[in-house]
Amino acid sequence: MGWTERKHQRLPMQSRVFIELEAAPVGSDEDATIAICKTLNVSSGGLMVALQQEVPVEAFLQIGVEPPPSATGSDAFYLLGQVRWCKPSDDPDYPWLAGFSLQQAEKSDIQSWISLITAMEPDH
């Protein structure tokens, strides 16, 4: 998706992100496989993250985003994202970049996320 095709304004924001790469099997004592990464920019409809491993394009993954310092009193945002693209980066600490489109989902914080991002946009 090129810059001209984007529906939402991108804002630079660095927050820690937790992505559930693999859910724990139902009824087991095993933990889910979680990747810890960081956002590079965000919008009300998506995120670009830097991460340590490749993620499968088109996969739907659970995402937890720590709120920015300006969002005092906010808990982490729990979102459902679909991987739109994933490519290598030049950062040895985070050798992969990925773009996620955020999805409407039950038990998701998508409406709170949209409210936060809208409030952060310069024209508001």
Image (cartoon, grey):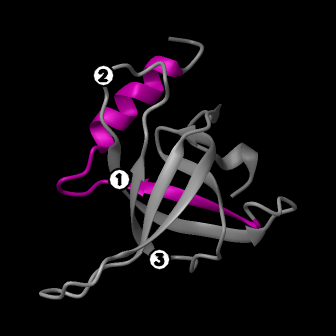
Label 1: element kind: strand
Check residue 80 for magenta coloring.
no
Q: Earlier in the sequence, mark 3 or mark 1?
A: 3
Q: Whole-Å distance between the Cαs marked 2 and 1? A: 18 Å
Q: Residue at x 18, y 56 (%)?
A: 106
Label 1 neighbour load within 10 Å: few <14, some 14-19, many 20+: many
Q: Residue at x 50, y 56 (%)?
A: 101
Label 3: element kind: loop
Q: What's under tag 1, amino acid-wise? A: Leu
Label 2 neighbour load within 10 Å: few <14, some 14-19, many 20+: few
Please state the extent of the stretch shown in magenta in the rendering.
Answer: 95-120
Residue at numbered disc 2 = 73
Per the rendering, the mark at residue 79 is 1
Q: Quadrant of residue 11?
A: top right
Residue at numbered disc 3 = 59
Q: Earlier in the sequence, mark 2 or mark 3?
A: 3
Give the image location of residue 31, x and y in percent. 31, 78
In the displayed structure, would residue 21 be above or below residue 73? below
* Tally of numbered discs: 3
